[in-house]
Amino acid sequence: METKTKKKKKEFDAVKTMREIRDAISLEIMNMTYTEERAYLDKLLAEGRSSKK
């Protein structure tokens, strides 16, 4: 007996989105020092927290 499943097209692909975000951040911080990276990431986190309120 064969089981057939129908694949639904995903409306949102979390893995794809996460990879895109990670790749974009990696490109932006590629040539930064640790201190510059830290300041950049702290700024991103602060902006993210304030925009969700």
Image (cartoon, grey):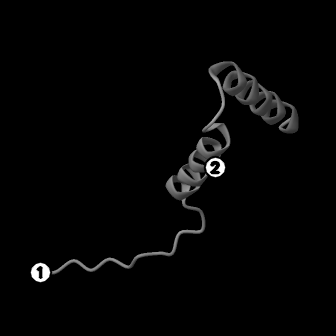
Q: Amino acid at mark 1?
A: Met
What's the mark number on residue 1?
Answer: 1
Q: Along the horizontal axis of the image, is 8 left or right of 29?
A: left
Q: Along the horizontal axis of the image, is 41 left or right of 30?
A: right
What's the mark number on residue 24?
Answer: 2
Of the pair 11 and 45, the residue shown nearer to us: 45
- Residue at 81% x, 27% y: name it: 46
Q: Along the horizontal axis of the image, is 37 left or right of 20?
A: right
Residue 53 to residue 34: above or below: below
Residue at the outermost top position: 35
Q: Amino acid at mark 2?
A: Ala
- Residue at 75% x, 24% y: name it: 42
Of the pair 21 and 25, the residue shown nearer to us: 25
Q: Which of disc 1 and disc 2 is earlier in sequence? A: 1
State which quarter of the image contains the N terminus: bottom left
Of the pair 5 and 48, the residue shown nearer to us: 48
Of the pair 51 and 27, the residue shown nearer to us: 27
State the SS at label 2: helix
Residue at the outermost left position: 1
Which of the 4 image quarters holds residue 3? bottom left
State which quarter of the image contains the C terminus: top right
State the SS at label 1: loop
Q: Along the horizontal axis of the image, is 22 left or right of 8?
A: right
Residue 35 to residue 28: above or below: above
Label 1 Cα neighbours within 10 Å, binned few <14 / some 14-19 / many ≥20: few
Which of the 4 image quarters holds residue 52? top right
Residue 12 in percent (x, y) is at 59, 62
Q: CA distance from mark 2 to mark 1?
A: 46 Å
